Image: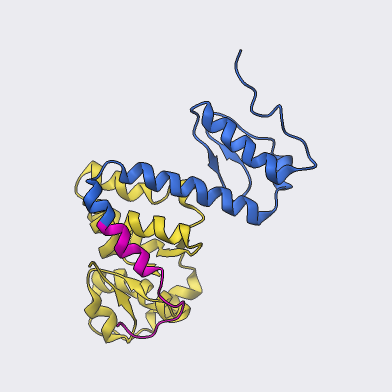
Chain colours: A blue, B yellow
Amino acid sequence: MARDPYAKIGVDRAGDQLGQLADDVAATGQPVLLTKRGALTGAMLAPIELLRAVPPAYLDQAIRQAGEAAVDNYLAEFDPEDVAAAAAWAEGLTADPPHVRRSA
Amino acid sequence: MIVDHTFIAEHGKGGVFLASAIGAYSRARKVLVIPLPSLLAAAGSATTPAARARISWLLSPQLSAVIRLQEVEEDDARAMLDLPVLAAGEGLEWAAWAPVVWTAQRLEVPVLTLNGKVYEAYGIAYRGLP
């Protein structure tokens, strides 16, 4: 019997249960695509009224986690040594102060 | 950080640096800004389906929290027309650089680019490949 990823959803703990929803949908092998408007796209659609109740910060976090997974999948195609070198360079970029007028 | 068309094109050619930056920025809870004209310029210069696919990947919904597309409104375009033409050159070349210069000046953030000389001419900070 197919799992119903929405069976656990209630309205009182929407934030936690969105995470559970994402985990459950991912376990089915379906793409998990959370949009800023709160819709879960792809083969499955979450109830919009539930996702609208999710705090935006939580939704942003869920999108970021999906993004990090997408990046990991993308970089899995490349030489691990190249990826490691690029990752070290990229971590340095994020140390930039938010406002930099001149190149170092 | 703003990403210009030269860096997006490098990603299209199979570079790992932009994807790595996306991952690092996501973990740091920061955003990368891509002016829409920069994305279009890079996509337009892509010569293979694979390069176009890599550039299209930047539009994946999963990346929407870390990549913010900067669209150019009509008023913004008018402001860009007032930008002095310095090292960026004329014509189509200028049209690719101007949105980045304008966005960088407005947001006061560095640009990720393969051609920092253009931004030096405008006094804008930049970062390039290691």
Question: Which residue shows up at 27% across the image and 41% down it?
Answer: A77
Residue B66 x, y percent position in the rendering: 47, 58
Q: Residue at x 35, y 69 (%)?
A: A92
Decide which of B51, A104 is in the foreground and name it. Answer: A104
What is the count of numbered marks? 0
Identify which residue, B73 or A85, lies in the foreground. Answer: A85
Residue A97 within the segment the image draws in magenta:
yes
State the quadrant of the C terminus of chain B: bottom left
Identify the residue at the far right of this view.
A12
Q: Is A68 left or right of B118, judged from the image as shown?
A: right
Q: Position of residue B110 (x, y in %)?
A: 37, 76
In the image, the segment drawn in magenta is: A85-104
Image height of A26 relative to B54, above or below: above
The answer to which of A62 and B73 lies nearer the viewer is A62
| Residue at image point 25% right, 64% down | B6
Single out the residue that lies furthest toward the top. A1
Measuring from the top left, give residue B24's x and y in whole percent. Answer: 40, 59
Lateral position of residue A55 relative to residue A60, left or right: right
State whether residue B88 appears in this view.
no
Screen quadrant of the N terminus of chain B: bottom left
- Would residue B60 be counted in the magenta stretch? no
Give the x, y percent position of residue B87.
22, 82
* Residue A82 seen in the figure: yes
Residue A85 falls in image quadrant = bottom left
Relative to B4, is B87 on the left or the right?
left
